[in-house]
Image (cartoon, grey):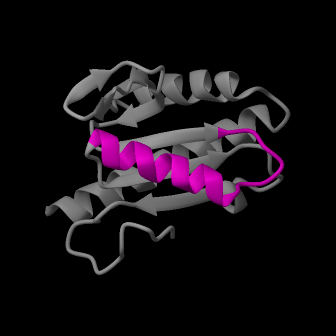
Amino acid sequence: MNERERLNKITEEIIGTAIEVHRVVGLGLLESAYEACLVFEFRERGLKVEQQKPLPVIYKTVRLDCGCRLDIVVESAIIVEIKAVERLNSIHEAQLLSYLRLYGCKLGLLVNFHVPMLKNGIRRVVNEFPDSAISADSAV
């Protein structure tokens, strides 16, 4: 299995898990509640998960711990950024793309739980996806 196939397989598992969480708890909760439910479900499914992972910023060769945190990192490969907002905006995609670049990750998912159907609240953001012509500024 190549890297692209591996990332796509993990992405499918993440989306399926998010849909399950949304189906069970619905909308109206805080992001932290969705995060806790997702982490529980990911671990139940045997996925390696890191929660609230600190993300330092390197500025002019100096490491600055400025309070950036990744909501969830799955299998050390995909960042999951959780939202519970009226609608996803370009600033959310820009934030995730910045996280992908700083962390050196190729793929991230924005998951907005504040929607009636979760499939309408998921956006895939890529940063030089392997074997792909998709640019770093694209969101699928």
Q: Is residue 77 magenta?
A: no
Report the residue at 29% width, 81% height from top. Answer: 133
> Is 2 displayed left or right of 82 in the figure?
left
Report the residue at 31% width, 29% height from top. Answer: 48
Q: Residue furthest left?
A: 1
Report the residue at 29% width, 65% height from top. Answer: 129
Q: Position of residue 65 (x, y in %)?
A: 37, 18
**Front-most of residues 129 and 136:** 136
Q: Residue furthest bottom?
A: 133
Residue 13 appears in the figure: no
- Within the image, what quadrant is residue 117 found in? bottom right
Q: Position of residue 17 (x, y in %)?
A: 54, 42
Q: Is residue 84 magenta?
A: yes
Against 57, is 102 above or below?
A: below
Report the residue at 66% width, 29% height from top. Answer: 34
User: Which residues are drawn in magenta?
Assistant: 83-103
Against 21, is 62 above or below?
A: above
- Within the image, what quadrant is residue 31 found in? top right
> Is 139 displayed left or right of 21 in the figure?
left
**Front-most of residues 73 and 44:** 73
**Front-most of residues 55 and 34:** 55
Counting labels gives 0
- Within the image, what quadrant is residue 47 found in? top left
Q: Main secondary structure of the magenta part?
A: helix
Residue 91 appears in the figure: yes
> Is 128 displayed left or right of 2 in the figure?
right
